[in-house]
Every structure is written in C-alpha cells, then in structure tokens.
Amino acid sequence: MKILDDRQIRQKIRRIAIEILERNFGESEIILAGLNNNGVGFARYLLDELLPITPPGVKISLTQIRLNPANPVEYDPVIDMPSEDLRGKPIIIVDDVANTGRTIFYAVQPLLDVIPKKWK
C-alpha cells in the first residue's frame, strides 16, 4: 500500500526543513543529529533541503548518534561530534521512527551532559 508518492514525500521533507529554520530563527548554527543509519539518511535529506534556503551566516551541521535499537541499554549511546561543538546550540534529533520511536528516548542520553540550547 502506497501512502505518499515521491512528490508528496519531497514536499513533506521541505516543510520539515522550513519549520526547522522557523523554529530556530536567529541561530548561527543548527545541528542535525541522525539516529543510527536511517536517521542520518533522513537527516541528509533534510540537509539537502535546508542548504539552499538557509540564510547566509547560518551553519547546518550533521552528526550521528549511534545505539543498538534492539537493546538500547547494551552500551551507552555515542554521538559522533565533540561535546564542545554541541554545547549551547539547538540540536534536532532525527529518527526514521521505523518502529516505535523508543530509541529516541535513549538517544537523548549523550546530550544530557552537553546542555544544548534546545532540542526538538
């Protein structure tokens, strides 16, 4: 069963990208943190939509949060960007939510010590 066609999917991704910019207006940097491979893949789609519409002087960074979705307590989640690069910046956690979305709860753990400006 097909829910959305390619055009509709691109429209949804573009709308999400616009909302990211709207909710972070005035920020000098926005960080997209993709959860595992699929989250990073979706974050790349967002990045492709964000780059052409991002105001000059605003940096969009991409990083990955890695954890075991089948057993998220097996090992601590790891974020591939140094803490000092995250501190005080808005962080958008991107997950494909292929299953329940419970992994996003564990993905927040490595960010608790960083104290981002905000996360969505």
Image (tube, helix red, strand yellow):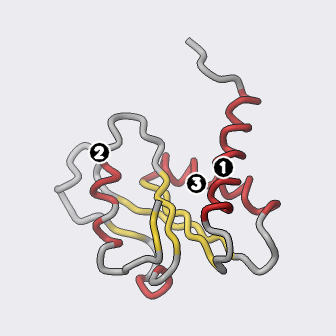
Q: Is residue 31 above or below residue 1?
A: below
Image coordinates of residue 43 in percent, x first then y, are 58, 54
Residue where numbered disc 2 is placed = 102
Q: Residue furthest bottom?
A: 84
- Marker count (numbered): 3
Instruction: Name which of mark 1 and mark 2 comes first in the sequence.
Output: 1
Decide: marks 1, 2 in contact (CB < 8 A)?
no
The circle on residue 45 is 1
Q: Residue at x 49, y 63 (%)?
A: 33
Closest to the observer: 79 or 14? 14
Instruction: Name which of mark 2 and mark 3 comes first in the sequence.
Output: 3
Q: Element type at marker 3?
A: helix
Task: Estimate how packed mark 1 is, as few (under 14), some (14 to 19) or many (20 or more) residues with alpha carbons within 10 Å.
Answer: some
Q: Element type at marker 1?
A: helix
Q: Is residue 11 left or right of residue 74?
A: right
Q: CA distance from mark 3 to mark 1?
A: 5 Å
Q: CA distance from mark 2 to mark 3?
A: 18 Å
Q: Element type at marker 2?
A: loop
Examine the image and state in which quarter residue 12 appears: top right
Q: Residue at x 36, y 80 (%)?
A: 114
Decide: marks 3, 1 in contact (CB < 8 A)?
yes
Image coordinates of residue 48 in percent, x first then y, are 73, 55
Q: Residue at x 31, y 49 (%)?
A: 103
Q: Please, what is the three-letter code of the amino acid marked with disc 3?
A: Ala
Q: Is residue 25 left or right of residue 38?
A: right
Examine the image and state in which quarter residue 83 appears: bottom left
Residue where numbered disc 3 is placed = 43
Closest to the observer: 34 or 26? 26
